[in-house]
Image (cartoon, rainbow, N blue to C red):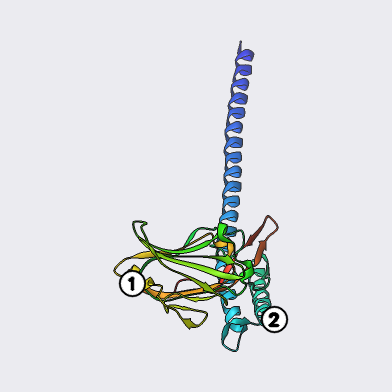
Amino acid sequence: MKKFDDSAQLLLIAGFAVGVGIVVITIMLNNVIYASNIASESSIDTSRYDMANIIQITTEACEDAYQYGIANGSHNSVDNDNFNQYMKNYSRKVSQSYGIAGLAFTCHPGNLSKAYFTHSGLADGDDDWTVVENINITNSFALSIPDISLLGNRSNAVMVKATNISGTLLWSMEFYNSSGKINITVSDQSSTIGNYQSNAGEINITSDRIDGSGIAPAFLFSGSTAGQDYSINIINGSHVVGTYSISGNLSTGQQFTQARYWVVNPTISISSREMTINRTIPISLPGGVQ
């Protein structure tokens, strides 16, 4: 009987030991899985932060390189070699900085090119978009279309319009290629203000001038938008290549300047032993709202 009791006690102790072992192993596995997930998520978040930071500094570097490359003080004359040399120096410095953290960095800036009137400045960018919103006063607003042959025809007419905060149309300018000239139709809320033509593709909306010459009647942009808070929008922007510049006051009283003379489309990459992230980012130059 005593021998039987000893065997039962041994079985009980063995069962208890097995149970404790299972609990310990389960806890250890959970800790390993948790630590692995935390490390993975930390790596992903760090990479996202690094990429967001690189996009910001690359945008600023392109803007600085653009200013460095401007020749003779003209926005229309930019030395691509100077631009690329600046970006090459930038890429080398950033690569050295991130190398300390164990990350490889590359940047292929590409060349400056004339921009489409899309949101991104690229041919496949958003056609219909808001250039600036919450405007109170526009002091200057000019467009330039250097190659009229790239402008769409009547069925693909481009429109620049001002709408108030309720979306009501206050003023619009529609233009398209008509036998090698730009046909322009200007309208307000209720009627057509006038029909005009441009030979050189230079349209100064606030100064009421086409191709550097005075015109009559005026475009009436300031009068049509007076006393309103409004936005300036572009419709069908993929059918025209050119430049624009706008300046004035926002409804907050803040002054703004927005211009796009060129676009550049750099590809940037960061990589570690675990992952590689690539981004291509269209950048408008000289920059956005200030």
Left or right side of 42 for 218: left
Residue 241 is situated, as x and y percent measured from the top left of the image, at 59, 68
Q: CA distance from mark 1 to mark 2?
A: 44 Å
The one nearer the camera, 212 or 65, is: 212
Looking at the picture, does residue 80 appear above or below residue 272?
below
Q: Residue at label 1?
A: 223
Quarter of the figure that contains the C terminus: bottom left
Please identify the residue farthest to the left as the structure is shown. Answer: 227
Residue 101 is situated, as x and y percent measured from the top left of the image, at 64, 66
- Residue 162: name its quadrant: bottom left
The one nearer the camera, 4 or 32, is: 32
Residue 194 is situated, as x and y percent measured from the top left of the image, at 43, 69
Do the residues under discs 1 and 2 have CB atoms within 8 angstroms? no
Binning the other alpha carbons within 10 Å of mark 2 as few (below 14), some (14 to 19) or many (20 upward) gives few
Q: Residue at label 2?
A: 81
Amino acid type at image mark 2: Asp
- Residue 124: name its quadrant: bottom right
Tag 1, which secondary structure?
Answer: helix
Number of the front mark, 1 or 2: 1
The one nearer the camera, 8 or 127, is: 127
Identify the residue at horizontal 60%, vertical 55% (top origin). 43
Quarter of the figure that contains the N terminus: top right
Left or right side of 244 for 179: right
